Amino acid sequence: MIIKRPYYLQKLIECRHTRMIKAITGIRRCGKSYLLFELYSTWLTEQGVQADHIIKIDLEDRRNKALRNPDELLHHIDSQTKDNEMHYVMIDEVQLVDEFEDVLNSYLKMPNVDVYATGSNAKFLSKDVITAFRGRSIEIKVYPLSFKEFFSACNGTKEKALDIYATYGGMPQVLEFNDEELKSDYLKNLYSETYIRDIKDRYCIKDDEVLENLLDFISSSIGSLTNPSKLANTFTSLKRESISRNTICKYLEYICDSFLVEKVLRYDVKGKKYIDTPYKYYFTDVGLRNARLNFRQLEPSHVMENIIYNQLRIRGFNVDVGIVPVVKRTPDGKQQRVTLEIDFVCNKGSRKYYIQSAYQMLNEDKIRQEEASLRRVDDSFKKIIIIGQDIIPRRDDVGITTIGIYDFLLKDNALEL
């Protein structure tokens, strides 16, 4: 099964020959190796690059165990670069090599070597890339399949495909299973045996009950405002144990560093400043979130919000939660300061959008509720409501655009409709 990933492929194409290391990061099993060894390698071949000038090294393969030694790896690459034509060196799971940064940095000044490396979330995080290569790398962060990529490999209607996607997510291997039990078991095993184990191994966590419980709390409250103090109180009230705020902060950082979830800050739209706390968490893949909860709390409105967030990140947007402070009068005539929320404030270059996720808007009260915060924003950037139906895009008399979830997920220019 071939699943095209045009966004990431184009990023690799644009970054080639830049005399920088291309570091491909992302959650385990999201398709980094396939992107590099299959899609990008095929594209290079189609451009006329000879096969012996594409050097592929899979360090997870036991046959290549000797190449986990940095000097052996260096010697192997040198032995493959026999002329002055460009050679493309692709190393999978480079973190298995001690001092891998020295090996890769050795090729930065060689005009005929272009280096690409993938790494797992166990030892090859964004902050590791920044530290190891000191400004001499380009990070390309890969997410699980977008719905458009997922749908391209599905049979049936887009409605059925989205139902499957909202339940089991976009990990590529999910598409290999037709049986729902197999999908479920795969995701639950992936969660516990890969991601949780990675976190435990990297940070030497011995008492993992706090980590496990914290993941349960976050999974149950995607899209909800929280902070370390609130989570610590949750431990006290539900688990009858006292966990310090600092411990919660530390474990939350570990979970985010693993690429399993992303933390989203709040931004005061009128005051043009960030609010330190509280904030939100979204899962990189909703299927993994659902697996963590044994597929009990599917909550379509919250899952749709998470899917929208992921799609915005896949498209390269910086995403915040927006707040709009307003003053209202109480029934007794007093003024009261309240805060309205905008689900997502998205920025990419000069482009900016305010987006609300609304699973359903069945009556005028619900419409007014979803529009309230958008109506209070007084700049000229586009304001959009995404609903969980297939509708014709429409714009009202105050400039708020409403589009359906299928248009948003399947059309790259959906925000311009």
Image (cartoon, rainbow, N blue to C red):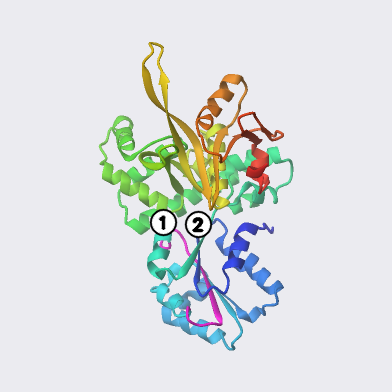
Tell me residue 260's x, y (percent): 46, 50
The residue indicated by pointer 1 is 198
Q: Residue furthest top?
A: 332
Q: Earlier in the sequence, mark 1 or mark 2?
A: 2
Q: Is residue 378 left or right of residue 71?
A: right
- Separation of disc 1 and disc 2 at Cα? 10 Å
In the image, which residues are magenta? 108-124
Magenta segment includes 212? no
Whether residue 184 is visible: yes
Whether residue 179 is visible: no
* The disc label shown at residue 28, or none: 2
Label 1, secondary structure: give it.
helix
Q: Which residue is at 57% across, 58% downward?
A: 31
Which corner quadrant of the image does residue 384 belong to? top right
Q: Is residue 16 left or right of residue 212?
A: right
Which corner quadrant of the image does residue 227 belong to? top left
